[in-house]
Image: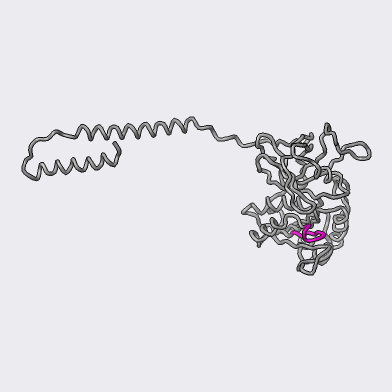
């Protein structure tokens, strides 16, 4: 019997009892009390069984999964990862999604990159003129906590051996990856202003830093991104940067400049120059309160901040040196 029916029956029983005491006596009738008590007992038993079965099910539930502590990447050795799928991005760029084992995340720290090469046992292993493997650095665009996938946004250059090699990979084929390789440890609010000057596919480390920094509600650093490209259709991650700027208008500004712009383009035209840097990047006079990140094609990096020396920073030069910046204020990715 349901609880509702038991309650209604109880009220009827009470009315009968009341009538017996307020009116003339009636003829004796068989009592329904045993049924009422029996119904209440059945309902109570059902509730106990339900609650008890629920607690048993909860006890049998699997314990929460332990937080992942180690990355599937190896900073000392190359590990082969299979290409899961390719997503075309524009006329010469695509997203390459590699599979991470057991649904693990990369746990890549900010700001860091990886280096890649073709697997040693691959029939089409990529090697240079000296017979040694071609190795190139890349910065993923996937968040460090993305489970099961590792994503690169790679522009194919006709003269780029590795970018051509990756663009020709088929799903199921592998790429050997080693990392993470720490570039510059990011510390929240270390600087009042951070200027970012990027060109072409050199945008990926800037994207990594911005996604991480702006997701922090305590961030107060003011970021300015100056992004140079050949044409408007070459601008990578434009929708993402515009969305970040809209969401964080007080801490992010984005400035685009194009080498080849049509009449409809309203932004800057030409290479990154002193005028653009002076107008948008925090001045050298801010001292330790300002930092400038630079990443792009070697020619652009050299013109803006001086040539890199392999994996080392190299001497500061170019426009930034002319504007008074010091080596401590500039970092070349």
Identify whether 259 is placed above or below 131: below
Relative side of 14 to 233, left or right: left
Position of residue 242 measured from the top left corner of the image (x, y, whole percent): 69, 59
In which quadrant is the N terminus drawn? top left
- Farthest residue toward the left? 24
For the point 86% across and 56% down, the residue is 300
**Residue 85 placement (x, y as % from top left):** 72, 42
Determine if the magenta segment contains residue 297. no
- Please tell me which residue lies in front, 38 or 86: 86
| Color encoding of the figure | one colour
Residue range corresponding to the magenta coloring: 225-234
The answer to whether residue 298 is above or below residue 98 is: below
Q: Is residue 267 above or below residue 26?
A: below
The reply to whether residue 185 is in sight is: no
Residue furthest right as drawn:
130
Lateral position of residue 178 relative to residue 35, left or right: right
Residue 265 rendering spot, x and y as whole percentages: 77, 67
Q: Position of residue 231 (x, y in %)?
A: 80, 60
Question: Height in image: 240 above or below 7?
Answer: below
15 horizontally vs 6: left or right: left
**Residue at screen point 69% across, 55% down:** 240
Q: Total marks drawn?
A: 0
Residue located 79% across and 41% down the image: 169
- Residue 68 visible to an observer of this rendering: yes
Of 106 and 332, which appears nearest the observer?
106
């Amino acid at each position: 019997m349901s609880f509702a029916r038991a309650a209604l029956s109880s009220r009827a029983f009470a009315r009968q009892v009341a009538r017996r005491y307020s009116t003339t006596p009636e003829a004796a009738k068989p009592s329904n009390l045993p049924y009422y008590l029996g119904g209440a007992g059945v309902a109570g038993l059902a509730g106990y069984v339900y609650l008890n079965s629920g607690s048993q099910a909860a006890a049998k539930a699997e314990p929460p999964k332990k937080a992942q502590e180690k990355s599937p990447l190896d900073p000392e050795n190359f590990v082969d990862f299979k290409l899961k799928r390719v997503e075309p991005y524009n006329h010469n760029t695509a997203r390459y999604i590699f599979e991470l084992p057991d649904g693990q995340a990369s746990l890549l720290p900010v700001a860091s990159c990886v280096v890649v090469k073709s697997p040693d046992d691959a029939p089409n292993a990529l090697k240079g003129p000296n017979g040694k493997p071609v190795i190139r650095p890349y910065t993923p665009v996937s968040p460090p906590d993305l489970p099961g996938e590792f994503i690169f946004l790679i522009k194919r250059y006709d003269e780029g051996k590795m970018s051509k090699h990756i663009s020709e990979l088929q799903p199921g084929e592998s790429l050997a990856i080693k990392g993470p390789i720490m570039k510059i440890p990011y510390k929240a609010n270390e600087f009042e202003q951070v200027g970012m000057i990027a060109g072409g596919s050199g945008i990926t480390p800037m994207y990594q830093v911005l996604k991480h920094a702006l997701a922090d509600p305590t961030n107060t650093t003011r970021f300015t991104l100056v992004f140079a490209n050949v044409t408007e259709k070459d601008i990578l991650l434009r929708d993402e940067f515009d969305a970040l700027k809209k969401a964080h208008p007080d801490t992010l500004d984005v400035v685009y400049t194009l080498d080849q712009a049509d009449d409809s383009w309203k932004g800057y035209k030409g290479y990154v120059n002193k005028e653009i840097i002076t107008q948008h990047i925090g001045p050298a006079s801010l001292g330790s309160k300002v930092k400038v990140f630079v990443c792009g094609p070697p020619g652009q990096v050299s013109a803006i901040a001086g040539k890199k020396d392999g994996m080392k920073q190299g001497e500061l030069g170019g426009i930034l040196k002319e504007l008074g910046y010091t080596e401590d204020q500039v970092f070349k990715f």
